[in-house]
Image: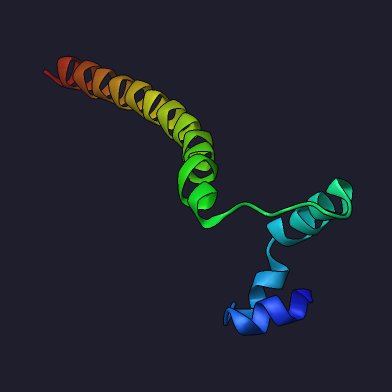
Amino acid sequence: MISMFWYANALPFNSASSDFYPQMVASIAEAGPGVNGPTTKELVGPCLEAVVHDVDKPIAQFKVALGALFTTLALIYQERDILED
């Protein structure tokens, strides 16, 4: 049935090479028989929001680190200009 899902939805075959594919299969196996997958409404709502939240946190951390780097670089260039004068 997994392959039928692939074919019926025209999923790219290289999706099976994704790091998330074995994790998904393991999650389904762990949930056991009778598990229901997320609905379309859940996928575009709470499921997507959770992923966006997971991505937003490292982006915010990166922006803070990048800001600190730019501040450091600005200070270095300022000091260099002062020393050259």
| Residue most extreme to the front | 34
Identify which residue is drawn at 45% across, 26% down: 61
In front of the other: 47 or 84: 47
Identify which residue is drawn at 88% across, 51% down: 32
Q: Where is residue 72 drawn, in percent x and y?
A: 33, 20
Q: Quadrant of the N terminus?
A: bottom right
Identify which residue is drawn at 72% across, 81% down: 4
In front of the other: 78 or 40: 40
In front of the other: 34 or 31: 34
Let me know if residue 19 appears in the view: no
Vertical order, 13 against 30 (above or below): below
Q: How many marks are shown on the rendered structure? A: 0
Q: Quadrant of residue 11?
A: bottom right
Q: Where is residue 57 drawn, in percent x and y?
A: 48, 29
Let me know if residue 41 appears in the view: yes
Q: Relative to 29, is 24 on the left or the right?
A: left
Vertical order, 11 against 58 (above or below): below
Q: Where is residue 42 drawn, in percent x and y?
A: 53, 47
Vertical order, 85 against 10 (above or below): above
| Residue most extreme to the left | 85
Q: Relative to 48, is 71 on the left or the right?
A: left
Q: Relative to 52, is 14 on the left or the right?
A: right
Q: Relative to 64, is 42 on the left or the right?
A: right
Q: Quadrant of residue 81?
A: top left
Q: Quadrant of residue 82?
A: top left
Identify which residue is drawn at 62% across, 52% down: 38
